[in-house]
Amino acid sequence: MASPLPDPGGGYGSLYAALSERIAQCGRGGARFGVLLVGPEHLYRTYAHHGHLETAAWLDAVEARLARALRPQDRLLRCGEGRFAILTADLRNEGHALLAANKVREVAEQPVKNGSGEIALGVVVGVSLFPDHGGDVERLLQCAELAWQSALGGDKAIAVYGAGLDREIEEELRLEHGLDKALENDGLSMHYQPKLMLGDGRPCGAEALMRWQRAGHGFVPPDRFIPLAERSGKIFALTRFAINTAVRQLCEWPASRHPPSVAVNVSARVAQNSELVDMVRTAAAIWSVPLPSLTVEVTETALMSDTEASHRVLGALREIGCRVSIDDFGTGYSYLSSFRNLPADELKIDKSFVQSMRHASADLRIVENVIALAHSFDLTVVAEGVEDGETFAMLSKLGCDCAQGYYFSRPLPQEELIAWLAQRNAGAGR
Ligand code: G
Ligand code: G
Ligand code: MN
């Protein structure tokens, strides 16, 4: 059991001692053993949800349960804050380590009773093997930590250390650091892809897309750094930057027949946090931009991941006058019933449908019906990924409201967008 007194090794002292002892034993006989790091996926969130006392009670209960489930020759120790280390004896191969990890996870994820109800936490396991991954305490623990990090960030809850993991995680840490620097030093900018009204072919706004020029590396695609920012929590700082920049730059766009508007993408985690409402309100106030000139785009899948929270936040945004658009529509499972209370003003039909509607009659019928359904719920419809004139004409005939795509323009830096808008507004045609 863990000592109630502070461990001089920051919680790792007895683990170091036990590990060196086991290495000494196994090293002589040529036996293999595994190091399993085990702990809740979201320790700090658990503190916030359940409080420190209940979290500690959960850890005690899981410790007792694990101690019963393990074999007598295995060792269970506390490992820093909120985690356990298990030293398993006599493993034949990696497969056996995985079996052990699965069993441990299953045991640890069983609900624990507390006063009135129960707590069940998702648990993550990182595994390293002696002598395969390291011959000394330091390296074995580091490999187990690398595996743990990769399990935390990945979609599998159990990870065994593997070659390449060091590099992968190192690169991830470097990217994260680079992103911090970019936020401080103007490494980020917004590009804008124009949207056109299908009725008169005039510009009606633009979608803001973030660009990261990484010092010494060129552009990093958003598909690479947005998920990273989501995992690390930096997504809030990035979104604040995106909203502020977009609203500020919108003020420099030339006037046109349709009032200019800008759309900013927000990811699931942000759409579920009421901080988004403050970001939008503050940016609009600072630059004196009317709130209906700002649209927040959230993907259909993000909307479904925590319906209650995102509906509350998006509802609040609409209440203050900001527009809400459902992005990549059609790629999630859009139940018809979800239309009943969709917290949105606009649907963006995913480009996969738009790009194939010319050739595939199934996609054409989907586009046709989404437009009709959306209109019957008073939603504006934007087709994204329009790449040719034929598709543009078809969308016009179907009564789609707006279009966006390479056919008109790629995402452009601010100065190029301003020039593009000025030329379009002058009626220069394409
Ligand atoms: O621009 P493309 O440019 O490659 O963008 C790729 C993806 O990244 C798109 O799905 C887009 O929604 C997303 N994306 C671009 N900029 C931002 C941003 O500022 N915030 C978020 N959350 N996603 C963005
Ligand atoms: O997921 P979201 O809709 O926010 O992403 C917009 C993405 O689509 C951006 O990466 C943008 O560069 C890309 N895009 C915009 N227009 C077109 C187009 O006509 N064709 C293709 N293939 N991609 C496009
Ligand atoms: Mn978008």
Image (spheres, helix red, strand yellow):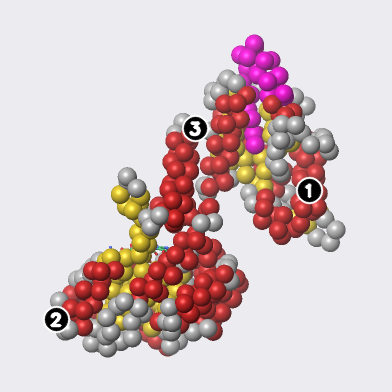
Identity of the residue drawn at 48% across and 66% down: 240
Identity of the residue drawn at 81% across and 40% down: 64
* Quadrant in the picture for the C terminus: bottom left
Label 2 sits on residue: 428
Rendering quarter of residue 188: bottom left
Which mark is first along the chain, 1 or 3?
1
Q: Position of residue 166 (x, y in %)?
A: 48, 34
- Can residue 332 be seen here? The reply is no
Stretch in magenta? 17-37
Label 1 sits on residue: 56
- Overall secondary structure of the magenta stretch? helix
Measured in 3D between alpha carbons, the distance from the residue under mark 3 to the one under mark 1, in whole angstroms, is 32 Å
Q: Secondary structure at mark 3?
A: loop
| Badge 3 amino acid | Gly
Dot 2 alpha-carbon crowd within 10 angstroms: few under 14, some 14 to 19, many 20 or more: few
| Badge 1 amino acid | Ala
Q: Nearer the viewer, mark 3 or mark 1?
A: 1
Residue lying furthest right: 115
Instruction: Establish whether ligand 1 lies closer than 8 Å to the Cβ of label 3.
Output: no
Q: Position of residue 425 (x, y in %)?
A: 21, 83
Label 3 sits on residue: 162
Q: Secondary structure at mark 1?
A: helix
- Can residue 141 be seen here? The reply is yes
Q: Position of residue 328 (x, y in %)?
A: 40, 68
Q: Is residue 362 left or right of residue 318?
A: left
